Image (cartoon, rainbow, N blue to C red):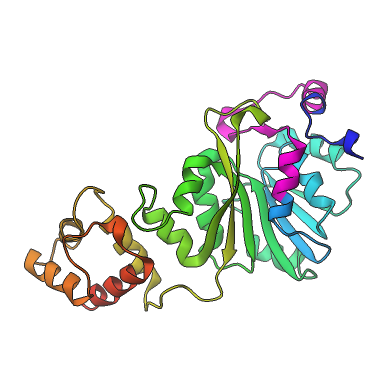
């Protein structure tokens, strides 16, 4: 079966040439050509006969077929109309794959889950995401609190490091907090740029995000918490007091300082040193003013 894999340099080139396919930068297309890495991705996703998978940007189906061999069903969203007939051909041996020609950012994924994945025990998103819209795709799905148990996705290494960063590190920022509020994030593997056609300009990493049953901190208004976090990181080099005084510009600076202290936090600290729990404390204090 291995000799039939799409994800070899030779087979990928053959499919591309046969269909006269050309890469479009606007779709962020980079096709993976390494079977060893594909195996590691599906291993990291813990797929099995009771798992339904949502794939985003299947391309010509290299990752799709690896998922299909292990999962009960695969729903693959592809935005590029030129790839639909190619996928019809490359996925013909996998009746458990359904390709939907739609932009994932505009799709009603919740409705699709009810219609297509009602008979699975677990749902995973497994994808080689277009790098230029990785964050909108992930946050768009995560914040909807869909019944997705985990996300195992390839992305730019730099973004992966932010998603999984801990307080006090250079990569820790508002995105780290937003993702880690909803999920437990860790890097599963790193991927060199040389295993793609065409090769991207940066190295990649695969991140696994497991949905939390409960958030790490309880707040009365999640939207306010996320807004406050963004305000606190507005200028990274500035102190928490300076950034929040700017964000809550309607409040006297002395009051901002007093409120930060009321939350049990030193106003001279920087946002990158605060845990999610500490941001939760800040949120509850500032929300009442």
Q: Position of residue 92 (x, y in %)?
A: 90, 43
Is residue 52 in sight in this rendering? yes
Is residue 60 in sight in this rendering? no
Residue 275 located within the stretch drawn in magenta? no
- What residue do we see at 40% from left, 78% from top? 218
Residue 60 quadrant: top right
Location of residue 4 with respect to 187 vertically, above or below? above
Quarter holding the C terminus? bottom left
Query: Seen in the image, is 239 located left or right of residue 168?
Result: left
Query: Seen in the image, is 31 located left or right of residue 70?
Result: left
- What residue do we see at 32% from left, 68% from top? 279
Q: Position of residue 184 (x, y in %)?
A: 53, 63
Q: Nearer the viewer, residue 233 or 194?
A: 194
- What residue do we see at 30% from left, 74% from top? 281
Query: Seen in the image, is 66 located left or right of residue 202?
Result: right
Residue 276 quadrant: bottom left
Quarter holding the N terminus? top right
Q: Position of residue 119 (x, y in %)?
A: 80, 70
Q: Position of residue 220 (x, y in %)?
A: 37, 79
- What residue do we see at 45% from left, 73% from top? 216
Location of residue 137 with respect to 19 vertically, above or below? below
Magenta stretch bounds = 12-41
């Amino acid at each position: 079966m291995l000799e039939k894999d799409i994800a070899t340099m030779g087979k990928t080139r053959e499919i591309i040439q046969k269909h006269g396919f050309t890469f479009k930068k606007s779709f962020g297309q980079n096709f993976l050509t390494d079977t060893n890495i594909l195996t590691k991705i599906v291993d990291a996703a813990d797929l099995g006969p009771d798992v339904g998978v949502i794939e985003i940007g299947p391309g010509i189906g290299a990752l799709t077929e690896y998922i299909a061999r292990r999962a009960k069903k695969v729903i693959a969203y592809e935005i590029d109309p030129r790839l639909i007939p190619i996928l019809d051909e490359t996925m013909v041996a996998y009746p458990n794959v359904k390709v939907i020609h739609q932009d994932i950012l505009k799709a009603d994924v919740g409705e699709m889950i009810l219609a297509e994945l009602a008979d699975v025990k677990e749902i995973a998103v497994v994808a080689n995401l277009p790098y230029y819209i990785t964050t909108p795709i992930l946050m768009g799905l995560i914040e909807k609190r869909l019944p997705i148990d985990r996300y195992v996705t390839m992305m730019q290494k730099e973004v992966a490091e932010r998603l999984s960063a801990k307080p006090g590190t250079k990569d820790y920022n508002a995105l780290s907090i937003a993702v880690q509020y909803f999920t437990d994030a860790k890097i599963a593997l790193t991927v060199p740029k040389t295993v793609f056609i065409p090769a991207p300009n940066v190295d990649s990493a695969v991140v696994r995000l497991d949905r939390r049953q409960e958030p790490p901190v309880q707040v009365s208004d999640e939207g306010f918490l996320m807004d406050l976090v963004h305000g606190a990181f507005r200028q990274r080099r500035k102190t928490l007091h300076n950034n929040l005084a700017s964000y809550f510009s309607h409040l006297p600076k002395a009051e901002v300082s007093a409120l930060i202290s009321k939350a049990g936090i030193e106003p001279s600290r920087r946002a990158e040193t605060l845990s999610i729990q500490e941001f939760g404390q800040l949120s509850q204090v500032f929300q009442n003013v």
